[in-house]
Image: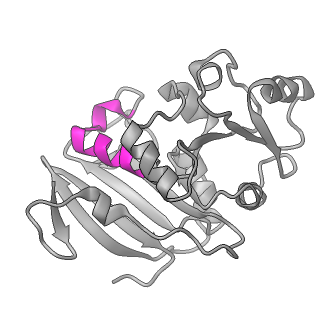
């Protein structure tokens, strides 16, 4: 993997590029990173899932970002479509996390309005640490009770999840870094509330055309143009790995 920006380097360790300091202890909300993959023409899925757009380099970045996060935030639709399981890390990655004062593995947090989730899937039955389920108070009480059997429930908002309140609740549980893995609707809700600190985007060297799903940020238009600042560009076998600070002046 080579670095194209800011300083060209024919061989670079991505861990050195993506490493960052934890947020200060007095910060009210966690630091939020969004990681997505898209084709050159903007598709976020191929044949309904992201696997067709991924590459060995993309998987390397995907797992690297997971080693940095305290919580992996994901929408319920993405959980269902991608068959999410618990986050598993190597022994070396878990040891590094312990040295940084983190838990051995990140926790999954599922954002869901309806609680239409299958509690018998491996995300809940094989979890090395209990996931979070984030839902609004209007969620069905029976489903919420079922969720509490296998996960820690965070109930915030009214008829929809209040993401600011959800992130504040996670911060109160010593969560410093949240990695959002989508989907596009959840990304849009985070962006619309100005909650994204960093966007990590893989551009896959492929064209998908029709049936490529939403763009990386979908649903309602954002309230105004969101400026981003390019932090780094890596390249591996034709895939580009872009890091942007969100809300900063373009550099």
Quarter of the rendering containing residue 18:
bottom left
Quarter of the rendering containing residue 122:
top right
Closer-to-camera residue (118/12): 12
Q: Whole-percent x and y of residue 179?
A: 52, 52
Q: Outermost residue, left direction?
A: 10
Q: Outermost residue, top direction?
A: 120
> Up-down: is 245 above or below 153?
below
- Is there any visible trace of residue 40 in the rendered image? no
Q: Whole-percent x and y of residue 75?
A: 61, 40
- Left or right of residue 142: residue 36: left
Q: Whole-percent x and y of residue 102?
A: 56, 53
- Left or right of residue 235: residue 35: right
Q: Main secondary structure of the magenta part?
A: helix
The quadrant of the rendering that contains the C terminus is bottom left
> Up-down: is 49 above or below 162?
above
- The magenta region covers 50-65
Q: Residue at x 77, y 56 (%)?
A: 169
């Amino acid at each position: 993997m080579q670095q194209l920006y800011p300083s060209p380097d024919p061989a670079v360790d991505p861990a050195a590029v993506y490493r960052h300091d934890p947020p200060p202890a007095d910060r009210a909300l966690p630091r939020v990173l969004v990681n997505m993959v898209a084709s050159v023409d903007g598709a976020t899925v191929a044949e309904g899932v992201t696997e067709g757009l991924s590459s060995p380099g993309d998987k390397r970045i995907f797992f690297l970002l997971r080693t940095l996060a305290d919580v992996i935030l994901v929408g319920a639709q993405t959980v269902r479509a991608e068959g999410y399981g618990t986050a598993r890390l190597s022994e070396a990655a878990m040891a590094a996390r312990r040295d940084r004062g983190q838990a051995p593995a990140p926790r999954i947090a599922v954002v869901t309005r309806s609680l239409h989730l299958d509690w018998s899937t491996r995300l809940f039955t094989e979890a090395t640490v209990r996931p979070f389920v984030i839902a609004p108070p209007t969620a069905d009480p029976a489903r919420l009770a079922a969720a509490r059997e296998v996960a820690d429930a965070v109930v915030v908002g009214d008829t929809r999840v209040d993401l600011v309140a959800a992130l504040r609740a996670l911060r109160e549980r010593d969560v410093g870094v949240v990695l959002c893995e989508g989907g596009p609707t959840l990304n849009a809700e985070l962006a619309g509330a100005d909650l994204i600190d960093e966007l990590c985007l893989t551009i896959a060297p492929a064209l998908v055309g029709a049936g490529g799903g939403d763009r990386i940020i979908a649903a309602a238009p954002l309230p105004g143009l969101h400026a981003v600042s390019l932090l780094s560009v890596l390249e591996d076998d034709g895939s580009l790995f872009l890091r942007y600070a969100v809300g900063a002046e373009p550099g």
